[in-house]
Every structure is written in structure tokens, then in C-alpha cells.
Image: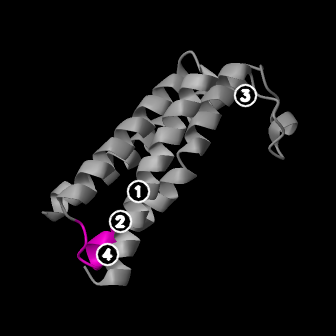
Amino acid sequence: MSIQAVLLPLFVEVALTFVLLFWMARLNVAAVRGGTVRSQDIALREPNWPARNRQIQNAYHNQLELPTLFYVLTILSIVLRHADLLFVLLAWVFVALRCLQAFVHVTDNDVPRRGALFLAGALVLAVMWAVFALRILLGI
């Protein structure tokens, strides 16, 4: 696989993270400037933000958790030359599920649907890791 094909899903995941980061920052700055939140009320990460701010914050922070394992796996797969068509297809499925989960998170925040999307993404990533580990351990 070309390096571009392997890295494109990772770039989409990174872009999603930055979109949520800048959205969160815009809402947070507006809340402080507008007087909805006093800086001393959130200085030590107290949860005193308006609900919408917390919703976007949680969606952003969620992109810093499970995707970390995806980033590491992508780098390892490139370095060890194990990034093939199966890897790229599963990477796209994982990233698509992350995008869908983020969409649910920032819209209606339906927890069962969001949880199902999270679980599906986690399972795809677990399969990616299992395939990678088996290929490394068995020398395939």
C-alpha cells in the first residue's frame, strides 16, 4: 500500500480531533467572555461549563482516548511494513465509526447509539491489533 493510502485515515481522525478542539475552544471562550462562566469556576477543571460546552468537550476528549491506540498501530504498521489493504480497509471502518460517534456525541447525544458506535470502533481496532500481533509473532 502507498504511504498516502495508509496515512489518509489517520489524517481524517486528526482532522476530526482538531475540528472538535477548535469548536470547543470557541464555545469556551464565548462562555467566559459572555459571563456565563467565570474563569475561577473552571480553573481547576471543575465541571462548571454549560451543558453544550461539556458535550463538545467530552466529544473532543473522547478523540484523545481510543484513537491513541490507532495512531500507534498505524505508525508501527508503517515502520514494520505491515500496512496492507486489510489494514487500510479496517482503518477506514474505524475512522468512519469514530466520525459517526462524534456526530452523535455533538448532536442528540443518544447514549445507546453512541455506545454502540464506540463498541463497534473498539472491536474493529481490537481486530486490527490482533491481526498485526499475529502477523508479527508468526512472521507472516
Query: Does dot 4 land on a helix, a strand or a loop?
Result: helix
Pointers 3 and 4 in contact (C-beta within 8 Å): no
Q: Is residue 16 magenta?
A: no
Q: Which residue is mark 4?
A: 135
Distance of label 2 from label 3 (alpha carbons):
47 Å
Q: Residues at badges 2 and 1 in contact (C-beta under 8 Å)?
A: yes
Cα–Cα gap, marks 1 and 4: 12 Å
Query: Which residue is more in the foreground, 19 or 98?
Result: 98
Q: Specify the label residue 32 is tagged with.
A: 3
Residue in the foreground of this view, choosing between 101 and 4: 101
Q: Give the residue type that dot 3 points to.
A: Val
> Which disc is residue 127 wearing?
1
- Give how far across and how far down residue 9 sits, in percent: 29, 49
Amino acid type at mark 2 = Val
Question: Mark 4 near mark 2, Cβ–Cβ under 8 Å?
Answer: yes
Q: Which residues are magenta?
A: 75-83
Q: Nearer the viewer, mark 2 or mark 3?
A: 2
Looking at the rendered structure, the kind of residue marked 1 is Val
Please tell me which residue is depicted at 30% across the width and 50% down the height of the picture.
90
Q: Which residue is mark 2?
A: 131
Q: Is residue 98 left or right of residue 32?
A: left
Residue 135 appears left or right of 129:
left
**Residue density around tag 1, few if under 14, some if 14–19, many if 20 or more, within 10 Å:** some
Identify the residue at image location x=44%, y=39%: 98
Q: Report helix, strand or loop for mark 1.
A: helix
